[in-house]
């Protein structure tokens, strides 16, 4: 599958200083189905979990946005995939 970053996603990675390689690493191990989905996961080096919103269409994953969840989820250790 091919992974692309939207303009908004590129700006958020720069704003929050999230390396694109970390986002790619999170998405590599996930089984994603068609449609919009949210992925949340703790990443080493950050105090808050990372939330990634993706759109899966055909064999292309488009990262719509990504940001750190700063409200109420500090130190959580879970992985959630939502539709």
Image (spheres, grey):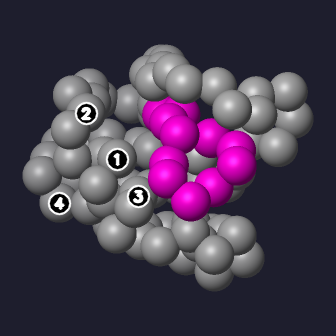
Categorize mark 1 by other alpha carbons within 10 Å: few (<14), some (14-19), many (20+): some
Tag 2, which secondary structure? loop
Cα distance in 3D space between marks 1 and 2: 7 Å
* Residue that badge 2 annotates: 30
Q: Which residue lies at the image location 59% right of the left edge and 46% below the top edge?
A: 50
The reply, left or right, for residue 3 in relation to residue 48 is left
Q: CA distance from mark 4 to mark 2?
A: 13 Å
User: With respect to residue 13, does 34 lie above or below?
Assistant: above
Marks 3 and 4, how far apart at CA: 13 Å
Q: Between disc 3 and disc 4, whose residue precedes? A: 4
Residue 26's tag is 1
Using the numbered discs, state the Cα–Cα distance from disc 2 to disc 3 in whole angstroms: 11 Å
Q: Is residue 74 visible?
A: yes
- Labels 4 and 1: the sequence-earlier one: 4
Closer to the camera, 33 or 43? 43
Q: Which label number is shown at residue 2?
A: 4
Is residue 7 on the magenta stretch? Answer: no
Residues 26 and 82: in front is: 26
> Residue 45's x, y, as percent?
56, 59
State the CA–CA distance, disc 4 to disc 1.
14 Å
- Say few, some or many: other residues with alpha carbon within 10 Å of mark 3 (under 14 / 14 to 19 / 20 or more): some
Q: Residues within 10 Å of mark 4 (few under 14, many from 20)?
A: few
Circle 3 residue: 23
- Residue 65: x and y in percent read 59, 56
Callout 1 touching callout 2 (CB < 8 Å): yes
Relative placement, left or right, of 3 versus 53 is left
Query: Per the image, is 43 magenta?
Result: yes
Q: Magenta stretch: give its range.
A: 38-49
Nearer to us of marks 4 and 1 is 1
Marks 3 and 1 in Cβ contact (< 8 Å): yes
């Amino acid at each position: 599958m091919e992974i692309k970053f939207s303009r908004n996603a590129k700006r958020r990675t720069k704003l929050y200083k999230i390396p694109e390689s970390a986002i790619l690493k999170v998405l590599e191990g996930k089984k994603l189905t068609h449609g919009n989905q949210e992925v949340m996961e703790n990443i080493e080096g950050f105090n808050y979990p990372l939330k990634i919103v993706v759109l899966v269409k055909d064999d292309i994953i488009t990262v719509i946005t990504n940001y750190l969840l700063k409200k109420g989820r500090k130190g959580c250790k879970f992985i959630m995939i939502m539709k």
